[in-house]
């Protein structure tokens, strides 16, 4: 791997001091040496420097837009350069408003991106829906084509064009989504019993080792139930002619029933 590192000691996407210290802290913990130690070539492009911005008035509800827009313009250019020089880019923040520049700069190198957003939060408030005004809770709204009409003109944001399709985003770790961030679409859950491990659900046509445990399988249904959006469920591929023993068939059928109960409110104790 060839890795290019850029530090973005920026904190104006939110209001807590200290997050600007992240880049150098991560370096001091040996990131460059440890990457080299595992065979990477590493080029450290250092830290961006961000000019102070005077009279940064709130736009809509978004706070400090000039500072955030300017910093992300610089970051976009830096990430684009790192990508053009053939590296995988590591951006060290700084607060999450920096994803605006990082993803924009990455997308500028031409190929359509998919985004895996690992976060307790969806960070997809718009400047008009944000409950706090902090732009670190909004970056996705500026990047996604489908939300373009929801974004007002913002000072120092004119350089930014949406560059990601909503279908190319996946979230992992979400557990604190604001009401305005929830996309209200009914859920169709299509559950093939062979997702479960054959030790638990052997009575199915195409068993594959390494499947979900009972706990993992049920967890999915309980969480989908909690969204309140479940509108239809498929529970398929239970086959009593497979699975060998009566016990195997019984286990498979019981699992299918438990999964459906999980979809409609049954919660395990503990
Ligand atoms: N969704 C929040 C938090 C964003 C966090 C940004 B990060 O980059 O860390 O993902 C607001 C969260 N929420 C507001 C209402 C409160 O009662 C609970 C927290 C927002 O400020 O938009
Ligand atoms: Mn975030
Ligand atoms: Mn954050
Ligand atoms: Mn977060």
Image (spheres, rainbow, N blue to C red):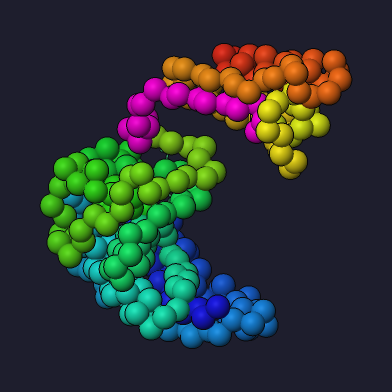
Visible residue check, residue 38: yes
Viewer-proximal residue among 158 and 245: 245
Q: Residue shown at 44%/17% (left/top)? A: 231
Residue at 74%, 16% in the rendered image: 240
Residue 168 in picture, x, y percent from top left? 38, 49
Q: Quadrant of the N terminus?
A: bottom right
Is residue 242 found inside the magenta-colored segment of the image?
no
- Residue 172 located left or right of residue 242: left
* Magenta residue span: 179-195
Vertical position of residue 30 compared to residue 190: above or below: below
Residue 254 position (above or below residue 26): above
**Residue 184 located within the stretch drawn in magenta:** yes
Q: Position of residue 239 (x, y in %)?
A: 70, 19
Residue sitting nearer the eye, 34 or 233: 233
Q: Is residue 270 visible?
A: no
At horizontal 20% and vertical 51% (from top left) the residue drawn is 58
Residue 21 location (% of width, % of height): 49, 70
Residue 100, image quadrant: bottom left
Q: From the viewer's perspective, is 238 left or right of 151? A: right
22 left or right of 84 in image? right
**Residue lying at the far front of the rendered structure:** 241
């Amino acid at each position: 791997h060839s890795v290019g590192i850029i530090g973005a000691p920026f904190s104006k996407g939110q209001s807590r001091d200290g997050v600007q210290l992240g880049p150098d802290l991560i370096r001091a913990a040996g990131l460059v040496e440890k990457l080299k130690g595992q065979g990477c070539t590493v080029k450290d492009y250092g830290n961006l420097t961000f000019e102070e911005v005077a009279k940064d008035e709130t736009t809509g509800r978004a706070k400090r837009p000039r500072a955030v827009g300017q910093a992300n313009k610089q970051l976009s250019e830096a990430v684009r350069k790192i990508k053009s020089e053939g590296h995988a880019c590591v951006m060290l923040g700084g607060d999450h408003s920096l994803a605006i520049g990082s993803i924009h700069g990455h997308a500028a190198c031409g190929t359509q991106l998919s985004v895996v957003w690992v976060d307790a939060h969806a960070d997809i408030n718009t400047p008009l829906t944000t409950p706090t005004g902090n732009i670190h809770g909004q970056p996705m709204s500026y990047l996604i084509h489908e939300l373009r009409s929801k974004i007002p003109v913002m000072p120092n944001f004119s350089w930014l064009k949406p560059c990601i399709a909503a279908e190319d985003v996946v979230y992992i770790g979400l557990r604190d989504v604001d009401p305005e961030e929830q996309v209200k679409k009914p859920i169709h859950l299509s559950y093939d019993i062979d997702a479960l491990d054959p030790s638990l659900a052997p009575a199915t046509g195409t068993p594959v080792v390494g499947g979900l445990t009972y706990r993992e399988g049920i967890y999915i249904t309980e969480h989908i139930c909690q969204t309140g959006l479940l509108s239809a469920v498929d529970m398929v591929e239970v086959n009593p002619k497979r699975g060998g023993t009566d016990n195997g068939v019984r286990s498979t059928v019981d699992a299918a029933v438990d999964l459906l109960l999980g979809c409609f409110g049954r919660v395990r104790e503990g």
